């Protein structure tokens, strides 16, 4: 077995990471207020959506630079139970996927970058995942979740109006919106 993970970066330590394709609820964040009242995905449904996230994040360079791996791998990292993504299909429109990101700490400096990167990675690719739009939000436990989520709402509105994901240059910081220095967008 090679030391490289299909998630990119870091070794594949069985004691540190859950198996790919495994649903371990005690290692995932609780469903937060953004997912309340919607059809939260669990078991095989969660795994299938998260597998797509992993592929899209790999292709589009959504990496957590602190840990040196594809952001989707955070869901499998047993050192950070309660961090990562949870997903739900909107109750009134199952063609809309909601994804709530819970960072490892309330002051995670990458939350803005990672959630914007996740939004850009998912959207504009309905043929790959079947959702018209994937709505991303930072969990309210993050100290800047209100500001981050306001920018995500703005990106979402622009995407709904134009049908395209705004360029990274259109963002407030004007820089890369993923953790990868080679981000393609």
Image: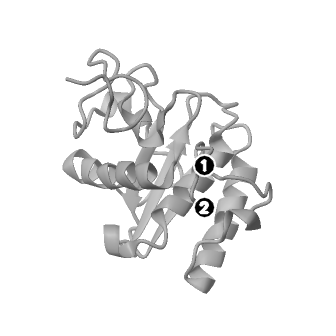
- What is the spatial separation of the Cα atoms under label 1 and label 2, in whole angstroms? 8 Å
Q: Nearer the viewer, residue 37 or 165?
A: 165
Q: Please name the residue shown 75% across and 68% down the image.
A: 170
Q: Can you tell which quarter of the image residue 49 is in? A: bottom left
In the picture, measured across the screen, residue 127 lies left or right of residue 29, that is: left
Label 1 belongs to which residue? Answer: 178
Percent coordinates x, y for residue 26 in the rendering:
33, 28
Percent coordinates x, y for residue 38 in the rendering:
40, 60
Q: Secondary structure at mark 2?
A: loop
Percent coordinates x, y for residue 10 in the rendering:
41, 25
Q: Please name the residue shown 46% across and 38% down the image.
A: 84
In the picture, measured across the screen, residue 98 lies left or right of residue 170, that is: left
Q: Please name the residue shown 52% across and 47% down the image.
A: 62
Which image quadrant: the N terminus? top left
Which image quadrant: the C terminus? bottom right
Whether residue 56 is visible, yes or no, is yes
Label 2 belongs to which residue? Answer: 185
Residue mark closest to the camera, 1 vs 2: 2
Q: Please name the residue shown 33% across and 75% down the image.
A: 127
Does residue 100 lie above or below 28 as drawn?
A: below
Percent coordinates x, y for residue 125 in the rendering:
42, 71
Whether pointer 1 and pointer 2 mark residues with C-beta atoms closer than 8 Å, the reply is yes
Farthest residue toward the bottom?
A: 162
């Amino acid at each position: 077995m090679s030391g490289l993970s299909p998630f990119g970066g870091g070794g594949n330590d069985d004691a540190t990471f859950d198996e790919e394709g495994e649903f371990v609820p005690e290692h995932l964040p609780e469903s937060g207020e953004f997912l309340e009242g919607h059809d939260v995905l669990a078991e095989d449904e969660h795994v299938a959506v998260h597998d797509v996230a992993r592929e899209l994040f790999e292709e589009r360079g959504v990496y957590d630079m602190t840990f040196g791996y594809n952001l989707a791998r955070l869901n499998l990292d047993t050192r950070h139970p309660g961090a990562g993504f949870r997903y739900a299909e909107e109750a009134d429109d199952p063609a809309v996927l909601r994804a709530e990101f819970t960072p490892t700490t309330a002051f995670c400096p990458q939350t803005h970058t990672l959630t914007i990167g996740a939004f850009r990675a998912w959207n504009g690719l309905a043929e790959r995942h079947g959702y018209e739009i994937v709505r991303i939000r930072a969990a309210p436990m993050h100290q800047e979740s209100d500001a981050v989520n306001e920018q995500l709402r703005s990106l979402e509105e622009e995407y709904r109006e134009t049908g395209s994901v705004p360029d990274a240059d259109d963002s407030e910081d004007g820089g890369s919106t993923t953790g990868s220095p080679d981000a393609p967008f």
